[in-house]
Image (cartoon, grey):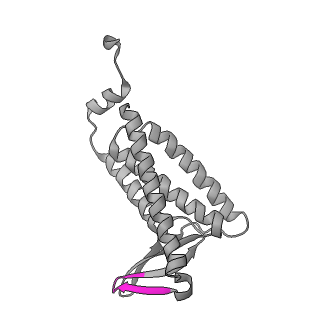
């Protein structure tokens, strides 16, 4: 198996792990805990499970109202997942491959929510005193962490060795 194929496989493993964790947590929130009936469950002084049906994108930004709004967000998310898949096939490091897979897995998890419910299931809520962070889910966390890792990777100096291994043999080696 080539390095590129191993990196692609790593990205696909990340995608599946994030998707399963996201959908499993949402199933438990909806059917096990039945958070829509409870509304909120305080776990710690700074952490609650709070039921929110998010009609926007990550952290409720860009709310999509109307009949076409959710479908437009689904179409955009699918286009992004396709672009991530193309990028994954070209990934040059484990960090990039894993991050791309995590982002795609989160995006697919939220797309499935939109198709099933017309909104995304959000439930993780951090707060301190009167300060409150957005309510989010496992998919959102994976997307944000994946993007942060890609940004950090982009800021890191690159070694020539990785680029040369992926480029294949040079003219002198043929």
Q: How many marks?
A: 0
Q: Give how far across and how far down residue 88 sits, in percent.
A: 45, 42
Q: Is residue 154 visible?
A: no
What residue is drawn where x is 47% and y is 71%?
136
The residue lying furthest to the front in this view is 32
Segment tinted magenta in the rendering: 40-48
Residue 82, by quadrant, is: top right
Q: In the rendered image of this protein, does residue 2 appear above or below residue 152?
A: above
Q: Is residue 87 visible?
A: yes
- Of the 4 image quadrants, the one containing the C terminus is top left
Report the side of 26 relative to 157 (left or right).
right
Residue 116, by quadrant, is: bottom right
Residue 53, by quadrant, is: bottom right
Q: Give how far across and how far down residue 157 sits, in percent.
A: 26, 41
- Of the 4 image quadrants, the one containing the N terminus is top left
Q: In the rendered image of this protein, does residue 171 appear above or below residue 108?
A: above
Report the side of 96 relative to 28 (left or right).
left
Q: Is residue 22 magenta?
A: no
Q: In the rendered image of this protein, does residue 50 appear above or below residue 7?
A: below
Q: Give how far across and how far down residue 57 sits, in percent.
A: 55, 64
Report the side of 77 relative to 87 (left or right).
right
What residue is drawn where x is 37% and y is 26%?
167
Q: Give how far across and how far down residue 62 sits, in percent.
A: 58, 66
């Amino acid at each position: 198996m080539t390095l590129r194929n191993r990196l692609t496989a790593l990205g696909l493993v990340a995608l599946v792990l994030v998707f399963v964790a996201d959908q499993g947590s949402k199933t438990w929130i909806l059917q096990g805990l039945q958070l829509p009936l409870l509304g909120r469950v305080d776990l710690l002084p700074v952490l609650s499970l709070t039921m929110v049906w998010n009609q926007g994108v990550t952290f409720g930004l860009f709310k999509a109202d109307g009949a076409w709004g959710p479908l437009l967000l689904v179409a955009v998310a699918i286009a992004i997942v396709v672009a991530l898949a193309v990028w994954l096939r070209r990934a040059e490091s484990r960090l990039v491959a894993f991050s791309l897979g995590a982002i795609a897995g989160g995006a697919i998890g939220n797309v499935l929510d939109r198709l099933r419910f017309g909104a995304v299931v959000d439930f993780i809520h951090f707060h301190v005193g009167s300060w409150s962070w957005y309510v989010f889910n496992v998919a959102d966390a994976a997307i944000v962490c994946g993007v942060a890792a890609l940004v950090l990777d982009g800021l890191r100096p690159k070694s020539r060795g990785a680029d040369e291994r992926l480029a294949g043999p040079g003219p002198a080696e043929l």
